[in-house]
Image (cartoon, grey):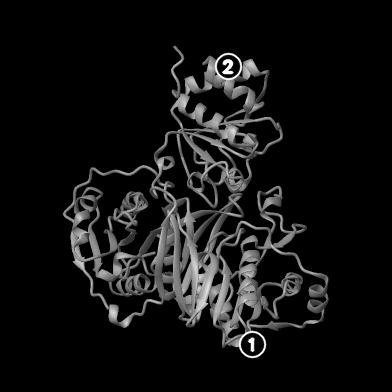
């Protein structure tokens, strides 16, 4: 089976710093692999360990620095890595990103059977790029995938976690799936994985390489644009009281009474 | 944007497994009514996929909410959601009726359907909006949280339809006292030309109903990892019972097995907006707070005085929930 694994480098959203003008300070913020993509990689590696002759090609779209992340994922046991990188990709929304990645997959991994993405990226949290790629490649999609059950007759049986329960579905390949986080700690690379990854070449694809034009990529190729971005400041009062237990209980009672939650008579 | 060709707001009416229309649809209809006024009174329409005859069971619901037209697709195959079937038909419909705006509830199903449809239509989509408005140029201005809720972005779309998804409970209140003669428009089904590639083999229900009490609760008491163990949640339950509140939990507490995933509040759980939210032993990770900052009044109890929850609370009580709550329950 040929797997294309799509991952994203994201700023560590738990460590956001603000400039004086309430814009996000991007310098010096650590980049991490999107936490959902870690489990997308886990799912790909699980398939590789259970299905004969499985190869995994990792794709990411981003600046040159994203190579470090690709090396880390190669060290986990993936076979090849592709960096889709071009200044003309800057400012791409999910639509343009999906189009770009779909062209890169066609270019570097055209005989894929399965594409695996993370369900969300924690920076944008749109969950759109996966289904966009599936649409542009005209293949079926399965989102909210929790785990792999079995592979037979060119179909993958998967579980999906929905709001009201767990679905078991079978999808015909080729297909794209979006993986949720799982309940276990993701693996860490072994030293021989790191060594073999360091020897691997990362393929870099530019806009011309994947056969796209400036009007289809980046800001120009994006149907949406951000008209305004602002800091989400809390409108709440942030009054903090440090009292002894009796007074804390009294304060809680008073507040709940004044809010009409309880009747204090 | 003056726009002769594209007109009307189309909203996707999701049918749940229990065969009722998801409440997020009504929330979106109400918001669309407001947007429609700003656009000079364009139609607010719905699209629905049902098994044959089923659409008319919802007739009154559409009328009372003021839906002008219902475009319906009927087939036995529409009993279960299928990305292939639903997206292809929805794309065909929008190609014909040329909606100006297309709104879809940000349920798991909606978030599966919307990006597929947007890409196929070659249009933009803004996910998980918390605000929808019409700007001075007549464009849909969709505001959404990003970077884990810390940054808000208002997004415009250059193409049609301008698409957005909105989570359940974000536009909580809706009116049902309209009355319009809703027109029902049967749409051609081309099931033979579309292949469904994903077969549903099994479904195991883990939650009683998609709409649980948290959605409509006016008072929520939520617990985090600070409640430590089952005893902590038993205490929380007794406290909730005492004040007539509904219990919620953070992802951390759910992962510890202290509460079911159905009551998880936050980015990967539910969005709630009660009148009073009481956070007990919750540190206030963005992951959680993004799902509850819409609450009218927030009380936080935590023994860590530097916990970020205090930055967003109206009243913060620095103290031990294991001391304060038992005392409150007994002596109140």
Image spot of residue B261 (x, y percent) = 51, 48
Specify the quadrant of the image occupied by residue A117: bottom right
Specify the quadrant of the image occupied by residue B319: top right
Instruction: Identify the image quadrant of the C terminus of chain A.
Output: top left
Q: Nearer the viewer, mark 1 or mark 2?
A: 2
Q: CA distance from mark 1 to mark 2?
A: 69 Å
Up/down of A164 relative to A79, above or below: above
Q: Secondary structure at mark 1?
A: loop
Q: Residue at x 60, y 74 (%)?
A: A47
Chain on which label 1 sits: A
Image spot of residue B206 (x, y percent) = 44, 52
Q: Residue at x 55, y 51 (%)?
A: B267
Q: Does residue B311 appear anywhere in the picture?
A: no
Image spot of residue B103 (x, y percent) = 38, 60
Up/down of B235 relative to A113, above or below: above
Residue that carries the numbered disc 1 in the rendered image: A209
**Res. A250 mark:** 2
Q: Is residue B44 left or right of residue B56?
A: right
**Res. A174 mark:** none
Instruction: Identify the image quadrant of the N terminus of chain A.
Output: bottom right
């Amino acid at each position: 089976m040929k797997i294309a694994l799509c991952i994203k480098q994201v700023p560590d959203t738990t460590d956001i710093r603000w400039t004086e003008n309430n814009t996000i300070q991007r310098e010096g913020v650590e980049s991490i692999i999107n936490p959902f993509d870690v489990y997308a990689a886990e799912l790909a590696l699980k398939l590789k360990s259970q299905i004969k002759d499985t190869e995994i090609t990792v794709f990411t779209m981003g600046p040159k620095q994203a190579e470090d992340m690709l090396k880390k994922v190669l060290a986990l046991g993936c076979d090849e890595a592709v960096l889709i990188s071009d200044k003309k990709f800057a400012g791409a929304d999910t639509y343009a990103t999906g189009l770009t990645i779909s062209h890169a997959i066609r270019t570097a991994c055209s005989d894929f059977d399965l594409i695996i993405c993370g369900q969300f990226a924690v920076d944008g949290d749109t969950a759109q790029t996966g289904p966009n790629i599936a649409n542009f490649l005209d293949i079926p999609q399965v989102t909210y995938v929790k785990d792999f059950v079995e592979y037979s007759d060119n179909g993958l049986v998967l579980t999906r976690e929905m709001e009201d329960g767990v679905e078991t579905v079978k999808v015909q390949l080729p297909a794209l799936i979006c993986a949720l986080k799982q309940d276990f700690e993701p693996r860490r690379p072994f030293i021989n994985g790191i060594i073999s990854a360091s020897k691997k070449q990362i393929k870099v694809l530019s806009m011309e390489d994947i056969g796209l034009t400036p009007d289809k990529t980046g800001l120009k190729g994006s149907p949406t644009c951000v008209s305004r971005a602002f800091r989400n400041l809390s409108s709440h009062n942030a009054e903090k009281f440090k009292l002894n237990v009796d007074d804390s209980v009294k304060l809680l009672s008073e507040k709940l009474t004044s809010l009409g939650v309880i009747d204090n008579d | 944007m003056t726009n002769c060709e594209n007109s009307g707001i189309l909203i996707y009416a999701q049918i749940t497994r229990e065969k009722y229309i998801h409440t997020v649809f009504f929330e979106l209809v109400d918001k669309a009514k407001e947007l429609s006024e700003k656009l000079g009174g364009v139609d607010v329409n719905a699209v629905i996929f049902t098994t044959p005859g089923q659409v008319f069971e919802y007739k009154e619901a559409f009328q009372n909410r003021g839906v002008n037209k219902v475009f319906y697709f009927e087939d036995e195959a529409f009993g279960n959601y299928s990305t292939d079937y639903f997206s292809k038909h929805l794309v065909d419909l929008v190609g014909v009726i040329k909606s100006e705006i297309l709104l879809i509830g940000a349920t798991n199903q909606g978030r599966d359907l919307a990006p597929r449809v947007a890409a196929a239509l070659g249009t933009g989509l803004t996910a998980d909006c918390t605000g929808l408005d019409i700007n001075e140029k007549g464009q849909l201005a969709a505001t959404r949280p990003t970077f884990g809720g810390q940054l808000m972005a208002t997004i415009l779309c250059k193409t049609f339809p301008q698409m957005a998804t909105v989570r359940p409970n974000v536009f909580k209140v809706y009116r049902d006292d309209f009355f319009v003669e809703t027109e029902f428009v049967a749409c051609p089904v081309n099931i033979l030309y579309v292949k469904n590639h994903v077969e549903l083999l099994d479904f195991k229900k883990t939650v009683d109903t998609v709409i649980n009490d948290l959605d409509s609760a006016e008072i929520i008491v939520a617990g985090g990892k600070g409640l430590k163990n089952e005893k902590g949640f038993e205490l929380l339950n007794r406290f909730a019972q005492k004040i007539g509140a509904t219990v919620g939990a953070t992802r951390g507490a759910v992962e510890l097995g202290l509460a079911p995933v159905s009551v998880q509040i936050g980015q990967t759980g539910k969005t709630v907006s009660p009148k009073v939210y009481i956070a007990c032993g919750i540190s206030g990770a963005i992951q959680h707070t993004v799902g509850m900052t819409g609450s009218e009044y927030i009380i936080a109890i935590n023994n860590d005085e530097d916990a970020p929850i205090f930055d967003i609370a109206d009243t913060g009580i620095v103290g031990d929930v294991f001391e304060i709550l038992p005392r409150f329950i007994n002596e109140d």
